Amino acid sequence: MKDRIDCARASPKGLAAFAGVYAAIDKGGLSKQLLGLVYLRVSQINGCAHCIDVHSRELLQFGLTVEKLGQVPVWRDAGSLFSARERSGLAWAETVTRASETGVPDSYYEAATAEFSDKELADLTYAVGLINALNRIGVAFRRLGSRCP
């Protein structure tokens, strides 16, 4: 596959708006490792090869072990490798990403509110929405070898 349009060049203000959301999430108080896990898992679900690569590398830089990185796709079966907070964040990310299928059940919401404050859950949900949007832009425009998107 080859790149399609360069959406950053075609519409820089649109991309800048996404960058503003990213900056707000980054400063919101959630750990970089938790956000990285969420960004990676959502990117795996959406099939965004570039984002999988970027977020895997970032997680290693943030100190995530290779063992844990390899278990992200099967985190539910990884026992205590993931903390309760990470499992809750990953579960929330998956159900929100698949909202058309899941309807985001009350049980997931209740589990998430047990681990995250209202602000944290709002920021986590913004992060899930952001990476879903960026994955779709990256996949739509075949942004394989450059920044996503």
Image (spheres, grey):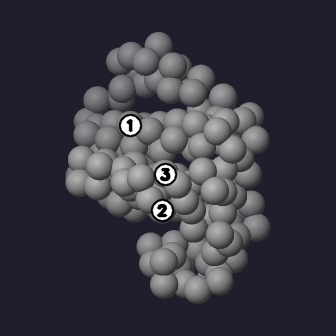
What residue is at 66 percent from the left and 29 percent from the top?
Answer: 24
Q: Horizontal placement of 111 versus 95: left or right?
A: right
- Residue 133: image tag: 1
Q: Where is residue 119 in the image (x, y as percent from the top left)?
A: 67, 36
Q: Nearer the viewer, mark 3 or mark 2?
A: 3
What residue is at 50 percent from the left and 26 percent from the top?
Answer: 18
Q: Position of residue 34 (x, y in %)?
A: 65, 57
**Mark 2, other Cα within 10 Å: few <14 / some 14–19 / many ≥20:** many
**Quarter occupied by residue 27:** top right
Pick the residue in front: 36 or 97.
Answer: 97
Q: Is residue 113 visible?
A: yes
Which residue lies under the disc numbered 3?
A: 109
Which residue lies under the disc numbered 2?
A: 91
Q: Which residue lies furthest to the top in this view?
A: 13
Which is nearer the N-term, disc 1 or disc 3?
A: 3
- Disc 1 versus disc 2: distance between alpha carbons? 19 Å
- Residue 25: image tag: none
Circle 3/circle 2 CB separation < 8 Å: no
Q: What residue type is labelled 3?
A: Tyr
**Mark 1, other Cα within 10 Å: few <14 / some 14–19 / many ≥20:** some
Which is nearer the N-term, disc 1 or disc 2?
A: 2
The image quadrant where one finds the C terminus is top left
